Amino acid sequence: MREVRRKMGLNQAQFATKFGLPPATLRNWEQGRSRPDAPTRVLLAVIAKHPEAVEDVLRKASQSVHGDRGADWGRGAVQQQLGRD
């Protein structure tokens, strides 16, 4: 996974955030402390070959959950609740 992430020019936190993975989990995989399960290995293989396709699916999924506001909706809602709008 490290090679794929580096080819994309991303650090661990950026890669994890972009593809919805916990940063600590990605770190453990890269350091050999644990291995992803079979479905996650399939996802990682698709990311390696077609990262744009995975990004597109995740973006669309986020929009369907949050409407047209997308991923920024959650941050905006939290800021609104805190009175920082």
Image: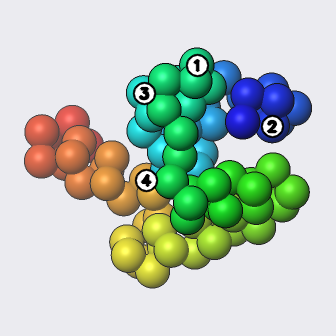
Q: Earlier in the sequence, mark 4 or mark 3?
A: 3
Q: Earlier in the sequence, mark 4 or mark 2?
A: 2
Q: Which residue is mark 2?
A: 4
Horizontal and vertical percent position of residue 32: 57, 24
Question: How far is disc 2 from disc 1 in space, using C-alphas?
Answer: 15 Å
Question: How far is disc 2 from disc 3 in space, using C-alphas?
Answer: 17 Å
Numbered label attached to residue 72: 4
Q: Residue at x 43, y 53 (%)?
A: 72
Q: What's the amino acid at mark 1? A: Gln
Q: Report whether residue 2 is seen.
A: yes
Q: Residue at x 76, y 67 (%)?
A: 53
Horizontal and vertical percent position of residue 4: 81, 37
Numbered label attached to residue 6: none
Q: Is residue 47 above or below residue 35?
A: below
Q: Are marks 1 and 3 in contact (CB under 8 Å)?
A: no
Q: Earlier in the sequence, mark 1 or mark 3?
A: 3
Q: Report whether residue 52 is seen.
A: no
